[in-house]
Structure formats: C-alpha cells, structure tokens
Amino acid sequence: MQSIEIYSDAISLAANTANKIVNNAVQAIKNKGVFSIALAGGSTPRGVYRLLASEQYEDQIDWDRVHVFWGDERSVPPEDADSNHLLARQTLLDHILIPSENIHRIKAELPPENAAADYERDLINFFKLSGGGTPRFDLVLLGLGEDGHTASLFPNTAALTIDQQLVVANKVDKLDSWRITFTPRLINSAAKVFFLVSGEIKSEILQLVLEGEFQPNLYPAQLIKPTNGKLQWLVDQQAASRLKK
Ligand code: 6PG
C-alpha cells in the first residue's frame, strides 16, 4: 500500500516526519517493547534528525527501547565527512540518551564485502533469525537521489537484483566508490517505509519514479514496494510540483 503526503515546504515536511516517527516508535514500544528504525543518509533527513534531538521532542521517545540501524553507508571510516553514521551522530545520536549498544553502525572501515557480511550478521542476531528469514524493520527511512537511486541502490548496479542477501557491497562505477546497502528484499520486508523528498531539484525524478514507466534498473526507487507493509512518500510542494495526479 502506498500513499503520498505533500507538505508546504521542507520545514513542514521535517516536522510531520518527526511526528510520524514519534508515533510509530511509541506504538511499536507499546505493542512489543522495541522500535527498530533504519536511518537514511544524505541531506534531506538532517532536519528530521535535528528536530528529534531538540527540546521540543525531548522525552517523546523512550530511546532505551529504540534500535538504530542504517539503510546504507559509504565505504569510509566513521569519522569521515561522507559517513552517514557521522551525519546521524552529529544531528541526533550525540544529543539523545540512547544506549550505545542500541546503535548498530555499519563497520564501513572494513573491506566492503566484509562490512556487508558483518552487518548482515548483526541484523540476523538482533532480529533473532536463524532459519534464513528476512528481518522486518518497524520503519525504514529512505531518500531519493536525482538519478532515482535510494539507499545505495544505484541505477544499473549489481545490488538491484540480489535477493539472496540482506546487505550487500555495491560498486557504484559512476561514483568510483563502494557502498554498503540494504537489498530491496530487506527494505520491502519492513512494516513501514518513508521516502523523504524535498526541493524543486527532485521534482523531475519524483514524477518519473511515481508516474513514469516501471524501469527499476533506471529508477531503483521503483523497486521499493513493501511486501506486507506501508510505503509513504513524504514530500514537499517543490518536489511534488511536476506530479500530474
Ligand atoms: C546516501 C543516501 C542516499 C540519499 C539520496 C538522497 O547514502 O547518500 O542513503 O540514498 O538518501 O542520495 O540524498 P539527499 O537527501 O542528500 O538528496
């Protein structure tokens, strides 16, 4: 099931996303005592992370019961400026009372294949899966690249068709770099997926992904269709400006 929510601007998008994350966390913790979330990298979620770390949201989430993961990571050490982990530390994690064991960092300083295998083991351990099942995140946050990528599922890369693994190392030739990323199988196993899309610069790709022909190799974001969960596109008016429906 998919829905699109259009907000007046980036500030309203961030505020509504933060509120939705709080609501999902409170509900999950109430129902099962834990909330698992996979964060997105890039710049769009910054405003959301900063809000969640602000006084306005203090005490709204019982961070003791929240486990934080990442949907993807650049193949760099944790202190590297490109690190998605560093972004989340600086904007959120270093400003809230969350136990360090609840922060599941991708060890991207390792060789990419090792980092991916290590993270897959962490996921299997955390979700207590032995028989080859697929972890079901309560919430996965995703961004949308101008080229239609999401997480580190880039156009025409090997990760798009891998479904035997949960996490893979993905060589992105156009960036001449390696990434570690959730596979579509893992993302689509989530109970809820939020795509956060902001700005005029994303208007063309958003229209192509949502209303264009199904070409997932070109627009990997089109691969995201939760099997038994909800997909919510949370966008601002600038990003939605070319949508026809
Ligand atoms: C990353 C992200 C990536 C990001 C998109 C959008 O590691 O960069 O996971 O998928 O979400 O590139 O990035 P912006 O939010 O910066 O536009």
Image: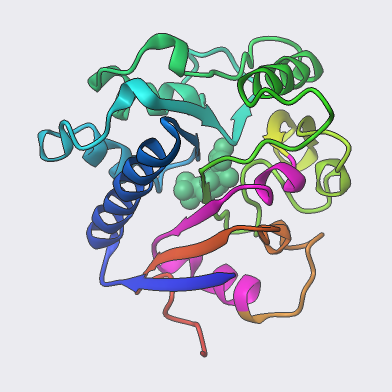
Q: How is the image coloured?
A: rainbow
Residue 110, placed above or below residue 89: above
Q: What residue is shown at x 50% (from left), y 57% (from top)? A: 195
Is residue 203 found inside the magenta-colored segment of the image? yes
Dividing the picture into quadrants, the one containing residue 46 is top left
Q: What residue is shown at x 40% (from left), y 48% (from top)? A: 44
Q: Nearer the viewer, residue 141 or 171?
A: 141
Is residue 198 found inside the magenta-colored segment of the image? yes
Q: At which x and y percent is residue 41?
A: 50, 37
Q: Nearer the viewer, residue 130 or 236?
A: 130
User: How many numbered marks, from 0 up?
Assistant: 0
Q: What residue is shown at x 41% (from left), y 30% (from top)? A: 33
Q: At which x and y percent is residue 101?
A: 46, 10
Which residues fall within the magenta stretch? 183-210
Q: Nearer the viewer, residue 148 or 142?
A: 142
Judge left or right: residue 62 versus residue 170: left
Q: At which x and y percent is residue 229?
A: 60, 58
Residue 164, placed above or below residue 131: below
In the rendered image, the quadrant that contains the N terminus is bottom right
Judge left or right: residue 132 versus residue 3: right
